[in-house]
Amino acid sequence: MEEFFLGLKGFPIRCGGDKLPFVFKDIMGLEPDVLAGSQTEDIINAVFGHVKDGYKFNQEQALSYNDQHYTCDPNLSDQSFCLVYIIDANTVHFTDDRLIDKLKIIRQRISDKGIPQVIVMTKVDEACPLVKNDLRKIYKSKKIKEKMDLCSAKVGVPMSHIFPVKNYHDEIETNNDIDILILKALEQIVQIANDRLEDSESY
């Protein structure tokens, strides 16, 4: 079986040839059957800016402060100002207590530092036939509302910070309805992160 090494990687966003003043950092997903300590600590450290870009996560052991990939005194540009959970609406159940426990630890540690958290709930078309037939009815769907409620209750993110979107998968052209949901989520995430950044600079 092929083994995948998950690492921290920053993705700057460009408009034309210019970089926009924000970066998305992709970190490993949570798996309930992986050692609890290494995953949660590495994710928390990555959000706080202690993990250098390009570091490959070790599922057996969390990054320690004396490692060459650890930044003891991160700059503002190293830190994250919003944590985004990507959750599949079609498979979200939160039935594993180990996963819930990890989410609670991460939420508490991140919240203690005042860092906002949001959820992007993907594949809404696969979770609801009504939405699959007409994406514009996404906020009228009882199924999507129930899944948003579940995400809010289990992850601890307010409903106003949960953004349902449809993924591109077999489309060969862009679709305005899909793009509007994705861009609206992106706009809100950037605004939420910017508000937190301005708060941190005011101290």
Image (spheres, rainbow, N blue to C red):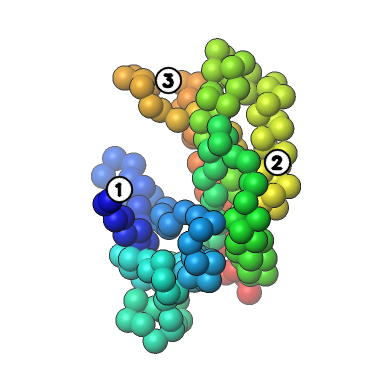
Q: Find residue 56 and report its horizontal and vertical position in percent.
A: 33, 66
Q: Distance between the residues labelled 1 and 3?
A: 25 Å
Q: Residue at x 43, y 57 (%)?
A: 28
Q: Which residue lies furthest to the top in this view?
A: 133
Q: Which residue is the site of mark 3?
A: 175
Q: Which of marks 1 and 3 is nearer the N terminus?
A: 1
The residue pinned by badge 1 equals: 18
The quadrant of the picture occupied by the C terminus is: bottom right
- Asked if residue 131 is positioned above or below residue 57 in the image, the reply reads above
Q: Where is residue 33 in the image (x, y as percent from the top left)?
A: 51, 58
| C-alpha span from label 2 to label 1 | 39 Å
| Residue name at image x 55 percent, y 49 percent | 85
Q: Quadrant of residue 131?
A: top right
Left or right: where 3 falls relative to 116: left
Confirm or deny contact between disc 1 and disc 3 (CB under 8 A): no
Residue 92, horizontal then vertical, whole percent: 59, 39
Secondary structure under tag 3 reads: loop
Residue type at mark 1? Answer: Asp
Earlier residue among tags 2 and 1: 1
